Image (cartoon, rainbow, N blue to C red):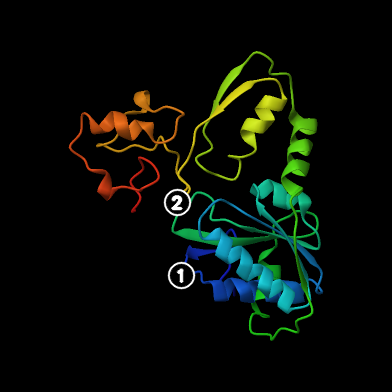
Amino acid sequence: MRQYFGTDGVRGVVGEDLTAELVERLGRAATLWCGRGRIFVGRDTRASGVELEAALARGIASAAGNAVVAGVLPTPAVALLTLDLGCVITASHNPPEYNGVKFFDRDGQKLTDGQEEEIEALLDRPGTDGGDIDEVGVATDSYLEHVLERFGSDLTGLRIGVDCANGAYSGLAPKAFEQLGASAAARPTCERCSRSSSATDSTSASPSTATATGCSPWTQAAASSTATRSSRCSHCTCTCPR
């Protein structure tokens, strides 16, 4: 019976259900399980991803494995570029305070329940050290090239507005559309809460006034609202805590 893995990896509120210590143990256990091989690691844009990525890589290296760390990548890219294992640090659609760890086998397939149970059984095994951590910067370009070759079509003359809600495609989608001939305008996003700067509530700018120029909707809303920015995120007009 699995204790940590759920329907889609290990997920939870960072610092409570999901700690750096647990993620490090998961990295070590997964490495032992796959024979101390190479594990390709990607993450989404959540602020907690940086710390958890480092913890996972430490765990991999502590079991004499090789962590190949690629930084921010969409989940499908990690599945495509997986080595002996692939691992993406993401909580998908869950709120910003959540994060998670999801593994793929060497064929890019999600691990079975039985395989996840086997990894859990190794969580308390000690490490052996002797591993390596390699950071790679070409994974994003490799994935973009694959997507364009596989699915690309001529978009010459089109003007496209892109709002990826600060997800992992935020840095990829505008480039993809532009390379296909379109003119793409990407909406800036909140680096803190992973929400688009167009996020609104009853006291912020309406969607019709939101623009692609960062936090300008706040300026527009301030003139007609008694709301104060002190109660808001310091990066944009969203309602996440400062």
The quarter of the picture where the N terminus appears is bottom right
Mark carried by residue 15? 1
- Determine whether 90 is above or below 232 in the image: below
| Viewer-side residue, 219 vs 76 | 219
Image location (x, y in percent) of residue 43? 62, 55
The amino acid beneath tag 2 is Arg
Task: Residue at 65% x, 49% y: name it.
Answer: 75
Which callout, 1 or 2, points at the residue further toward the start of the chain?
1
Looking at the image, can residue 118 be seen? Answer: no
Image location (x, y in percent) of residue 159? 58, 18
- Determine whether 101 is above or below 178 in the image: below
As drawn, is 54 to the left or to the right of 180? left
As drawn, is 16 to the left or to the right of 168? left
Looking at the image, can residue 17 be seen? Answer: yes
- Determine whether 170 is above or below 192 in the image: above
For mark 2, what is the residue? 192
